[in-house]
Image (cartoon, coloured by chain):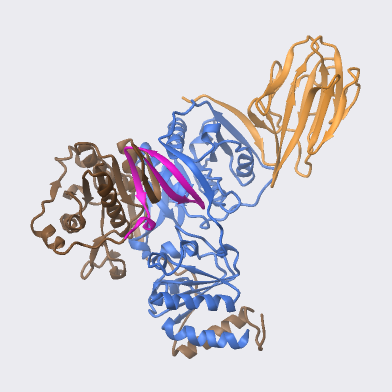
Amino acid sequence: MIKFTESKISAHHNYLVNDLLTPGFVVGDPNSSDAFYFWADLVLPGESTPHISARIMDEKGDLLLELNGSQMGENPGKCDYHPLQGGFKIFRRPNEPLLEVLTQNFPRGHMTRIKARLFDEKGDLRVEPLGESIQVHGEAKLVLDAPFTPSAR
Amino acid sequence: MNIVVCIKQVPDEPTIRIDRQRMTIIREGVKSIINPLDYVALEASLALRSRQGGEVTVLTMGPPQSEEALREAMAIGADRAILLTHPAFAGADTLATSHVLASAISKLEPFPDLVLCGMQTIDSDTGHVGPQIAEELGIPQVCGVNEIILEEDFLMVKRLSDGFLETLHVDLPALLAVTHELSSVRHLPFGALEVAFSEREVTQWGLEDLNLREEEVGFRGSATQVWKLQSPPPRREGDLVTGSPQTLVDHLIRKLEALSILDEEDGHE
Amino acid sequence: MGTNNALNGVWVFGDYRNYFQNRVTLQLIAKGKELAEKRNTKVTALLLGEQVQQYAMEYVAHGADVVIAAEHPDLKEYQVEAYCALVAQWVEAFQPEVFLAGATSFGREFFPRLAKRLGTGLSADCVALEVDPKTGLLLQTTPAFGGELLAEVVTPNHRPQMATVHPGVFQERPHNPEAVGRILYPDFNVLPQSRVRLIRSRRQQIRKVNLEEAPVVIVGGRGLGSKAQFERLFELAQLLEGEVGATRPVIRAGWAEEDRLLGQTGKSVKPKLLISIGTSGALQYTTGIQGAEIIIAINRDPHAPIFRMADLGLAGDASAILPLLLEALRKRI
């Protein structure tokens, strides 16, 4: 028998996570009111930019930043947002990269690479760099079949 | 360097005619030749031998008359010839053919440094037998070789593959399937053909010599079978025009006008 | 229908080198889908290499239900032995019933070795593939006897049933950005050093012979008789704003360079007009031209197979026809 890892793959857009392609993924629980989460939503045909929402903490478990649909929300950590060609990069002061999201365009498809080092409310490392992309730890749904609908907060 | 060259006796192209009623080749009047690319492989082996020394053995699997091809190969310069022939070998696909050839090569003492064959044959054209022999012998292969450069105990070869000109390092022993660019003209030494047919010896090996069973060879040892042979169906319902050259040209010009490749009156399209 | 059921259907080897000129994998996925539907199963595409994600997405967009992908820097260059070792493992694990590959240079040396390793049958350069309604077997139609006839071949007792197909025989399905498929990443071991190592690779210079884009193609065969006759085709091509192609016997005779070769081991073209002169019509050649909109053939022999492929046939001597044709065209253009 052969051991293998399985995922889904969309013709249009995929994220690279844990060394595999996926149309969308979630780490943690976006429904929570104050816990860590990182949510990369499906990008549908017609769109080409990813939708990233997250609540990110520092190593001590204190809230750094909230992202909603790739836009900055609450920012107690005073992080800097820099738009990039094909994505964006967020720096923690002082000058320490926190999160980078870059979308590569193929002739008829797109792939988003994420680089990040993210902690949750307990100070545990939940997302860290792995090669070209990231490795996630803890509670996560690595394959989203449909755009994720968070319950009303 | 000991080299084995696998050759095949094939019908000479312009003389192939088909009996479309019985769906077979008309055998009368058909001239047989060494497959052109195998001839190239043979020339290459002799060139390598003249630089490195060693022995060139030619091998073929076929009916008894294939021996002619082997004798011709010896006249050109091969040191040794082996005919693999047995009624059970008939009807073989490339799987069974490569099994017989590889079994024979395995029997050779010492095991060859290099196995050469032509990229494809003019009659069956699959190009499969070379790689399948290499797989059975457990040796690496390179197909489409158009240049061979001898090094200490490996080879450098060049070939064109899907639009890329590649230079490759190949560990020996290996199998190379060659293309016509490797060719150089070699003339038959005067009287050599006569000597090859009258004095030289051709070794003959059959089923038992190769330690093979009937189920492994020929039709029984094949994985593919031909269910049906047919003439290619007409793909287009075109008119066939006959007549004088001028008539034909007029017809063609009218067709080019109809296609708007030419204007109906004088002038550029 | 469990997870593994779909993986034992129709497999297509992903040959992605020269991706935008070489559409054969997409064509085979389309045909594979048709065959799979008749066998109530799915299409799986295989990818080995480095950074192959975009091809995985393309294959799904064009109809693959599943992709099996092995990514590793050591797999970056196409290589026969390493690919054979991995693919054979997967075939043994999942037991597909059909396995197709394009008859590219690589396919033609990789697939036979793989078939031998698996102890199964392989037919080359198929011009048609169908499922036999009675037996469910794959009917593989290939050229036989130097291309004069078609043989229908089957692999009754061995699996998978393997076949290579020349680019241009089948048609790909349109790109569908809404498609979603499964992707499997098998665990595999770091491969031992290859016994054939690529030292240098460079693209063959694309000279001015751009047959694939020419709206008019004039092809010369051995029936023209001599290199001098063949070379008259260049003026004809120039007058019609086209390009000159050749058959394998012409290349072998040294009348034209390999770049001009049309057919199974050469180029496939789909011009608006193709004029085939002095060619008998062997299948190895005609598979390269069957996509042309209009084919006009000139051959001395009224029974030459080329006439079965032509929209207009002229049975006559090319050496007499050509000068008259050139004269008539010079006056017009």
The number of callouts visible is 0
A13 relative position to C248: left or right: right
Any part of residue B169 in sight? yes
Q: Is residue C49 above or below residue C303?
A: above
As drawn, C88 above or below A97: below
- The residue range painted magenta reads B155-184
Q: Residue at x 45, y 58 (%)?
A: C264
Residue at 56%, 45% in the rendered image:
C16
Residue C209 quadrant: bottom right
The image shows residue C153, relative to residue A2, as above or below, that is below
- Determine the colour of chain C: blue
- Which chain is orange in the picture? A
Magenta stretch encompasses residue B213: no
The residue closer to the viewer here, B192 or C127, is: B192
Q: Quadrant of the N terminus of chain B?
A: top left
Residue B176 among those drawn in magenta? yes
Quick check: C241 left or right of C94? right
What chain is colored brown?
A: B
Q: Main secondary structure of the magenta part?
A: strand
Q: Position of residue C333 (x, y in %)?
A: 63, 84
For the C terminus of chain B, the quadrant is bottom right
Q: Residue at x 21, y 41 (%)?
A: B104
| Residue C160 visible in image | no
Question: Quarter-wise, where is residue B77 in the image?
Answer: bottom left
Residue B241 position in % (x across, y down): 46, 84
- Name the side, left or right, on which B252 lies relative to B131: right
